[in-house]
Image: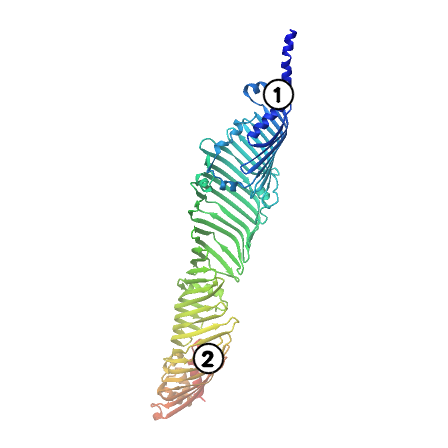
Amino acid sequence: MRKLLWLLLPVPLLLLLLYIALPYVARSLIEQWLSDQGFHTPRIELTHPGWSSLEIPSLSLSQRGDERQINLQASDISILFDPGRLLLNREISEIRIPRVQIEITAERSIEARIETSAAENFDLNQVPPTLLFQYAPARRLVIGEAQIDYQAPDQPSLNARGNIDLTREQLLSRMQLDITPQQQETLAPVYLDLRLQSDQQLSLALLRNNMLMAQVSGKLNTEGSTWGAALSSNIELIPLQQWLQSLLPNYPVALTEGRLDAQLTTHWPAQLPLDGTQLIQALSAELSSNLSLRSGALSIDEIEAEHGDLELTAHASLSASELQLRVLPGSSVGGKAVHAPGWAVQDIRLRLERPFELVHSLDGARTEPGPIQLVVTPEGMELDGVDSLSLSPLEVGLQIQPVPLGVEFRLNSKKLDLAVAGKQLPSIATQLSGQWHPDTARGTLRLQTQTPETELNADWRLSATDFHADWRASPLNLPSLQPLLRQWLAAWPSDLVLNRGELRLSGQLTGPSPGDAAVSAAVALRSTDLTWADHIEAEGVDADLDVQYRRNGSLSSGGVVHADLLRTGIDIRDTQLAYRYRQNRDGSAQMTTQPLTLNLLGGRIELPAITFDPTAPSFETTATLEQIQLSEALRLYQQPGLTGETALSGTLPIRIKGQDIEISNGHISSTTPGWIRYQPSTELELAAQSNPGLQLALSALSNLQLDQLDLGVHYTPNGDLELNSRLQGQNPDWQQGRPIDITLNIEENLLQLLRSLQISQRIGESLQKQLTR
C-alpha cells in the first residue's frame, strides 16, 4: 500500500505543477495564436482559474494592415463559466470587461481606399450582423466602458465612449459620440442608443441633453444575395439644428418647431459594388416622408420675416440609378410679416395644388421635372408709393427645363385692388406668362378691368441690360371711362361730359430695366361726342396722337385732332388741328400749333402757326377772315325780320397773355355788294308812328342795297366787345334810291351774348337807340 502511495504521489504533484504553470502556458499559446492572426506584440496576463471564473488582469493587442492600425487595451477581464457547460458544450456564461480602449488610425480616408482598391465588390455575407449572435464568445458579453477613437485623413475624427451588452438574443449599447469635423471645433457630445435583436429587429436613437434628435426602428434582412431594410424614422429638427449650429453659424433660419417622419424600404446586393456608379445602379429604395417646420425670425438676402413654416409630404423611389420624386398636393410654405426694401406682406402662403413630379437620372443622363402648380395667398400687402394693395390668391404654374436651363411660368390673379395718392384704381384681373433663361426672359402680360371694360396686352423681353415691351389696349368706351378721369384728373371739369366715343391705346417701353424705361404711346380717339356745360359742344371728334416719355424725364407729344362740328354759340365745321408739345425735366414746356382753318358762317377763319408756353401762354397772332357770309351771321343772331346777304373778309389782331384775350383794331369789310332787309316787329312799328326819325330809318332799311359794309372790332379780356360799323348803299323803294350812309356803334359783353345766343336782339335794340336820336 505504501509503495502504491509513493507511485501515485507524482500525479497530484504533476497536476499542481500544471495548475501553477497554466497561466504562463495559456498566455504563451494565446499570444502565439493572436500573432498568427496578424496582431503585433500581443500582451496578455492571466491568473489561475477558479472553479467557475477566470481573471485576465490586462490585455493589449495591435494590428497593422490594410492601410490602418488598430490598438486595443483592456484590463480586469472576468470570464464566468459553468464547468459542466464549459467541458460539455464549450460554453462560457459571461465575459465582463470593465474598460476597453480601441484606437483606429487610417492612413487614407475610406473614399480614397475604395477608389484605389483593386477589388470590384465587397462581400457583405462575410460580416453579417447575425455573426454577433452566432459567434459570440459567451452567452453574455458586458463591457462597462468601451472607448473607441477613429482618425483618418479628410474625414471627421470620432470618439465613442459607452457600454455594450451582448447576448445570444440581442445587442444593447449606449455610446457618447464626440465628432470633430475637419478644421472645426468638436461638436457637443451626443448619445447613440442601439438595440439589435437576433431576428434583426433594429432600434436606434440619437439624443443630446436627454432630448431625442433622431430615432430609427425597423427590420434588417441580411440573408441571401440581396440585403434590405424596412425602417421608420423620425427626426426632431430643433435639437439637431442646435447641435450643428457651430457648423452653420450663418444659417438664416432659427427653428421653433421641426419634425421629419419617414418610412424607408431599401434593397442592395450582398456583393456590394465599390464603384460609385455601379453601387447606385444596384440600389433600390422607396421613401415616404412628411416634413413639418416652424421658424422664428429668418433672413434670406434682403428678404426678412418674423415667422415662417413649411409642410411637405413627398414620396421618392430609386431604381436602376433613376430617382423619382413626387411632392403631394397640400404641401405649403408660408411666412408672416415678410418684408424687403420696397414691399411688405403680413401673411403669405404658397400651396401646391397638384402633385409635382421629378425624374432624375443619378448618372446625369436626364432630368425631367414635371409642372408645378401653386396657389399663392397674400394678405396685408404694402408697396412703396401705394396707399393700399390687395390681391386675390395667385395661381402659379411653372415648368422647369433643365438643359438648357429654363422655366416656363404662368401667374393668374382674378382680382387686384390698388389705391394710389388717395384714389382707388379699378379692380384688375392679371395674367402673366413667359419663359425665363439665365440670360433673358420674355413673355406676355394681360390686364382686364370690368369698370371700365377693357383689356391691356403686352409682349415683353428682359435681359441683364435691356428691357422692351410692346403693349396695346382693347378699344375703350369713353363714357365708361369718365368716372375714372374725374377721380384721377384734378383739372378735369366737373361739367365736361363724354357722350360717345372710343379710345384706342398702344405703345412701347424700352430701357435698361422696367423701372428705368422710356414710354411711347399712340393715342387714338374715334367718333367722340362731348359737351362742356354751355361752353362748347363737339361731335365726331377723331384724334391720332403720339406721346413720348424719355428716361431723362422729358415729355413730348404731337398729332392731329379733327372735329366734324364744334358749337360755341357758332357752328364750326370740319376743323383740324395739328400740334407738337414738349416738356423738359425742369418743367418748362413749349407748344406749337400748325396753321389752323376754322370753317364757320359760310366762310373761314385762318390762324398761322403759333409757338407758345402752354403753362403761361403769352403771344400775338392775326386771324384772317375770308368769305364770311352775312346771312349765316344774321341767322345765328336769330333777330326776327332781319336778313341780309354779302361776303365779309378782314383781319383780327389777337393778343393772348395767360387767360386773357384781347383784339385791337380789327377790321372786317364786305367784298361784294349785298343787301339788308329789316322787317320790324309790331311793337317797333307802333313806336315809329310817333317817331318820324325812327320811321325814316326803318323805311331806309326795309330794302337796303349794300355797296359797302365796314366793321371795326375791339375786344377786351373782360369780354367787352365794341363793333364800329358803317353801312353804305341805297334803298330803291325809298326816296327814289337816295344814297344811305349809316354809322352804328355796338358795345356788349361777348361772353354773355354767346352764352345766351341773343346778340341779335342786342343789335336791334342798339339800332333803335341810334335812329331815334
Give the left or right position of residue 731, taking residue 164 as reference. left
The CA distance from mark 1 to mark 2 is 138 Å
The residue depicted at 44 percent of the width and 74 percent of the height is: 580
Q: Position of residue 161 (x, y in %)?
A: 61, 35
Q: Where is residue 663 in the image (x, y as percent from the top left)?
A: 47, 82
Give the left or right position of residue 426, taking residue 599 as reference. right
Nearer-N-terminus badge (1/2): 1
Dot 1: few (<14), some (14–19), or many (≥20) neighbours within 10 Å? some
Give SS at disc 2.
helix
Residue 11 lies in what quarter of the image?
top right
The residue depicted at 47 percent of the width and 42 percent of the height is: 314
Residue contact at pointers 1 and 2, CB within 8 angstroms: no
The residue depicted at 57 percent of the width and 29 percent of the height is: 34
Q: Where is residue 650 in the image (x, y as percent from the top left)?
A: 41, 85
Q: Mark 1 points at which residue?
A: 52
Mark identifier at residue 750: 2
Name the image quarter holding the N terminus. Answer: top right
